[in-house]
Image (cartoon, helix red, strand yellow):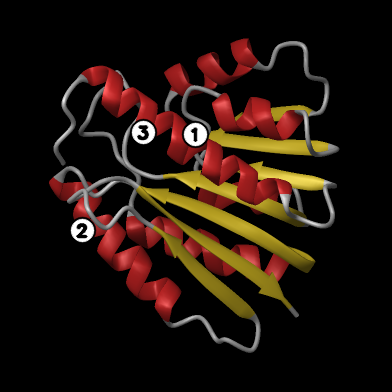
Amino acid sequence: MVFYSESDYNDYMKKITTIAQELLLEVNHKDIAVDFTCGNGNDTFFLGHQFKEVYAFDIQQQAIDNTENMCRYLKNVYVHLDSHEHFDKYTRRLDAGIFNLGYLPQSDETVTTNADTVITTLNKVWERMNYEGRVVLVLYPGFETGKREAMKVEEYCSTLASKHFDVMKHQLINRKDAPYIICIDYHR
């Protein structure tokens, strides 16, 4: 991916994050949202202002601390040091969810999300999604592990039955390996 400056990259990341969040605003029912990879807490904070309840997950204590600090005044946010794969221990239903795949910014780049766990979690989501809902995934193919993960997750998403799923891809096609979004609408 070629960016001319760190500022260009940061501007792009703000855009991709804003698009992902705007896609979640379009959800009809805003009762329960899940931030499956809370990281620094930005999406959790956003969701906390839009949904009645928000459940956030990460496996790294640093991410939990960052998210809890950012959301400290929000009484509707529940942050858990646990894999997103176990979200169903904390909430049985949801209307929306978001995944930011890859690694926690400014931390250990060897601790990454895993496509198999993401797919397992998505399969649980479909069982617990309210009548209709949306999941947004932000994929980061700019490093080798992220590239493999993106390919596997995208392959899974392409097999979802069109009777119950609409899967959209939002991607810059003129920037190799730029982060991109997969948006999945679910309806029974």
* Residue at the disc numbered 3: 12
Please indicate whether residue 86 sits to the left or right of residue 31 in the image.
Answer: left
Q: What's under tag 1, amino acid-wise?
A: Asp
Viewer-nearest of discs 1 and 3:
3
Q: What's under tag 3, amino acid-wise?
A: Tyr
Please indicate whether residue 188 sits to the left or right of residue 83 in the image.
Answer: right
Q: Residues within 10 Å of mark 2 (few under 14, many from 20)?
A: some
Q: Nearer the viewer, residue 184 or 74?
A: 184
Q: Earlier in the sequence, mark 1 or mark 3?
A: 3
Disc 3 is placed on an element classified as: helix
Q: CA distance from mark 2 to mark 3?
A: 22 Å
Looking at the picture, how far across and down is residue 54, in whole percent? 73, 37
Residue 90 in sight: no
Looking at the picture, how far across and down is residue 15, in whole percent? 45, 35
Height in image: 38 above or below 130?
A: above
* Residue at the disc numbered 2: 148
Quarter of the image that includes the C terminus: bottom right
**Which quadrant of the view contains residue 21?**
top right
Disc 1 is placed on an element classified as: strand
Viewer-nearest of discs 2 and 3:
3
Disc 2 is placed on an element classified as: helix
Residue 58, which numbered label? 1
Q: Residue at x 18, y 31 (%)?
A: 3
Q: What's under tag 2, amino acid-wise?
A: Arg
Q: Nearer the viewer, residue 105 or 63?
A: 105
Q: Residue at x 32, y 53 (%)?
A: 172
Viewer-nearest of discs 1 and 2:
2
Looking at the picture, how far across and down is residue 145, in whole percent? 19, 48
